Amino acid sequence: MKPETLNFFDRVYAVAKQIPYGRVTSFGAIANYLGAARSARMVGYALNGSVEKDVPAHRVVNRIGLLTGKHHFDGTNLMQQLLENEGIVIKDNQIQNFDAVFWDPRLEL
């Protein structure tokens, strides 16, 4: 299916599925890439419902690298554990060296 024929949530999932292992992006970066710059919160809503769609939602954080979506994952620290398993360093719910691991879909896709 062509990307322009997908609904917004499906377009979010399509972008999120392309985030490489060991990298993260932000809700806003996905929204900007999709041409909906003021829709970062809607990206979050989409990812909250992505559990059954095999989307690596744990790789999407807020604009400064905070794990703001972690309460949507089963268990207390599942999001952090998944990211740490990929080599991402987290301290106090924030990704360290955020700029080094940040993946910008506008530049990569």
Image: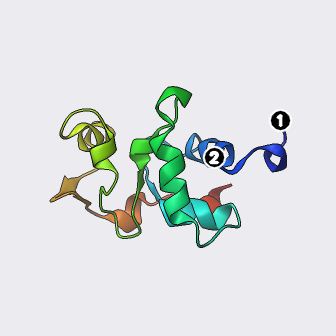
Q: Where's residue 88, x and y in %? A: 30, 49
Identified at 39% across, 43% down, the residue is 58
SS for tag 2?
helix
**Badge 2 local density, few (<14 within 10 Å), some, or many (20+)?**
some
SS for tag 1?
loop
Cβ atoms at labels 1 and 2 below 8 Å apart: no
Q: Nearer the viewer, residue 79 or 24?
A: 79
Q: Is residue 107 visible?
A: no
Q: Is residue 64 visible?
A: yes
Horizontal placement of 89 versus 101: left or right? left
Which mark is drawn over residue 1?
A: 1
Total number of numbered discs in the rendering: 2
Tell me how far mark 1 sits from mark 2, CA to CA: 14 Å
In which quadrant is the N terminus drawn? top right
Q: Where's residue 68, x and y in %? A: 31, 57
Colouring of the image: rainbow
Q: Which residue is mark 2?
A: 9
Residue type for callout 2: Phe
Number of the front mark, 1 or 2: 2
Residue type for callout 1: Met
Image height of 59 relative to 96, above or below:
above
Identified at 30% across, 62% down, the residue is 66
Q: Of label 1 and label 2, which has the lower sequence position?
A: 1
Q: Nearer the viewer, residue 61 or 42?
A: 42
Identified at 34% across, 63% down, the residue is 65
Q: Where's residue 71, x and y in %? A: 27, 46
**Badge 1 local density, few (<14 within 10 Å), some, or many (20+)?**
few
